[in-house]
Image (spheres, rainbow, N blue to C red):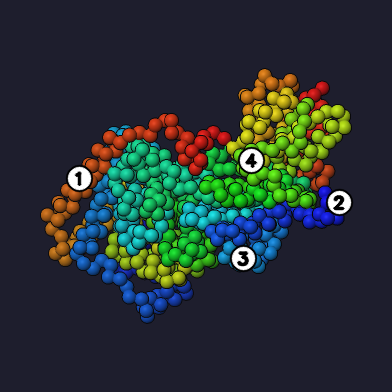
Amino acid sequence: MSPAHHTRPKKAPGTPKPTKTAANKAATSQRSSKTEIPAAGRGTVHRMDLLEAMLRIRRFEERCVELYSAATIRGFVHLYIGEEAVAVGVCEALTPEDAVVSTYREHGHALARGIPAEAVMAEMYGRTTGCSGGRGGSMHLFDASRRFYGGNAIVAGGLPLAAGLALADRMRERTNVTCCFFGDGAFAEGEFHETANLAALWKLPVLLVCENNLYAMGTALERHEAQTDLAMRAASYGMVAWAVDGMDVEAVEQAARRAVEGIRAGTGPHFLELRTYRFRAHSMYDPDRYRDKAEIEQWKDRDPISLLTDRMRANGELDDEDVARIEQRITTEIDHAVEAAEQAPEEPVENLLHHVTSSPAEGAS
Amino acid sequence: MGGDGTHEAKTTYREAIREALREALRSDDRVFLMGEDVGRYGGCFGVSLGLLEEFGPERVRDTPLSESGFVGAGIGAALAGMRPIVEIMTVNFSLLALDQILNNAATLLHMSGGQLPVPLVIRMTTGAGRQLAAQHSHSLEGWYAHIPGIRVLAPATLEDARHMLAPALADPDPVLIFEHGSLYNVSGELLPPAAPVDLDHAAIRRRGTDISLITYGGSLPKALAAADELAAEGISAEVIDLRTLRPLDDAAITASVARTHRAVVIDEAWRTGSLAAEVSARIAEGSFYELDAPVERVCSAEVPMPYARRLEEAALPQTADIVAAAHRAVD
């Protein structure tokens, strides 16, 4: 895959394209001979759910822009706009028992995982009712009850953690999968390569999800990677690896389901390179001087939400009334989340040293 | 020690740690040991020799040379209900895993608003004295003691080597155990502990009235030898073994200085920004009016640890340096 291919949106391939390696061939043949591909994406109801999940993220992020601009929420805020199909498609393939490890661009992952918008918004307000009690903020959302092990703001820092979560599941003979999201920038970090090797060596039940949005903050993929075919590089560790259209939620879901099925069947880690694009700057802080506006516009032609709605409209599965109804539901939900966050109590300063250690007594050493 | 022949059961520091590991692996099936060469090789310092044969490769797990990867995997496994013991060959190598130790192990509980405790034990070798030069010999435990959210232990005796691991595993938070490389061959009779070994208190290894020698880890034998020499001169030195470097046992330090009114802090790390600096500052803050002399420090020379024996010895705190510092404080 040439860099030129990467910077231009492609037509949806529909099905994941395995890269041509021995490992992939083995997985492909195993799949075609035995495994029934789940009926992901079939059925209007299911597509409607996917649409609503993506729209919820989009509208949530748009509200974050307003709140950040009004200086109501602070810190670094990394928006997921444009990448919604990745979180929604992948999380659709997971069960509640599976684990998720995320990055600092994680609002989408958290919402797709089922963390209520109210808890995520309250976290950004720094309130007690936030999903990290106001200690984490936008980059560090956690929900132990949903096995959501948080936003890691160190690029690739969550990968070793994911291997360990998976190792524990394996040692306890649980069939859970641990899904780890990270960006293309992680390929330049040692922790990615250490984890890819460890996971493949120990055949750990890990789904490695690379959100290739073509930029490591402001540095384009071809400016930070000598070899830009990320799926091929992952496959070199001896794991199944596919490059998939990350703008097509149904393609993402289908690939993720197939990967998760393979992992549960004991074939070890699987890697997905999901080719996507962020429509907004790296963070609310970023003037976005390093990208061509035309490139952004070109990718917006393949907006994951329009892609799905166009398909559904063409199928006669969606009309304006449906869209209005979904939008209304989401607006109400987000309004409620903002209202609840505004009214939520702030963590008392007396609690500053709580949760440094598990012992309630210890503050300083 | 066992001179009458009825107590021939001598134990080394290395064997005491091995026995602690064996006990932990036997008594809790969530416990597993993981690190470079802990299995088939038997541990790079021979600590885990025989454990692979006894517990199998799932629970005595050889890892690739990926410090960040396997320390992070230990954290993840701890989050998912296991009680991993991760071995890192030396403290110098642990710098490759510093991201995981600081940004995840020490931080996740707080950052998650209390949802994610990390019950992980990390063991590693520290210190000099074996001519291993500048990438195997440093004493960086003081850096780790800087970090809120982790407990830092430095067993200096056979008893602590044998009995600190169980309470460390019972701790819901990350515990780092620093084993001084020069102690592995120290042997003696391991007596059952008089009281349960706790992780909160310093120990008085020798009672005295004239001066407090405050130290930990590999410097403890040197401080005890200095106390012997001082005793021969009629100076009664108290020797405090900090044992736990974070959280520090302030009360023990304060009480000792209140008895002796003089203190020498011995720390094999570099002096600048060291744990010795922290202890000295705490004495200045909490015991200023008790002091009859300035606090003395005996630390390593500010140089990467050299290979040549004479140079290495010159770089390290030695018994004679401790005696000289005590003289400065007492005279």
Residue A38 sits above or below residue B1 on the image: below
Q: Chain of mark 3?
A: B
**Amino acid residing under circle 2:** Gly
Which of discs 2 and 1 lies nearer the camera? The answer is: 2
Q: Residue under label 3, please give it.
A: B55
Q: Position of residue A178 (x, y in %)?
A: 43, 60
Q: Residues within 10 Å of mark 2 (few under 14, many from 20)?
A: few
Q: Quadrant of the C terminus of chain A?
A: top right
> What secondary structure is found at the residue carrying circle 2?
loop
**Amino acid residing under circle 3:** Phe
Q: Earlier in the sequence, mark 4 or mark 3?
A: 3
Q: Residues within 10 Å of mark 3 (few under 14, many from 20)?
A: some
Q: Residue under label 1, please give it.
A: A332
Q: Chain of mark 4?
A: B
Q: Residue under label 2, please give it.
A: B3
Mark sitting on residue A277: none
Q: Residue under label 4, please give it.
A: B244
| Labels 2 and 1 touching (C-beta < 8 A) | no
Q: Earlier in the sequence, mark 2 or mark 4?
A: 2
Q: Quadrant of the N terminus of chain A?
A: bottom left
**Residue at left offset 77%, top offset 46%:** B129
Residue B93 sits above or below residue A204 on the image: above
Q: Is residue B307 left or right of residue A318?
A: right
**Residue at left offset 55%, top offset 61%:** B29
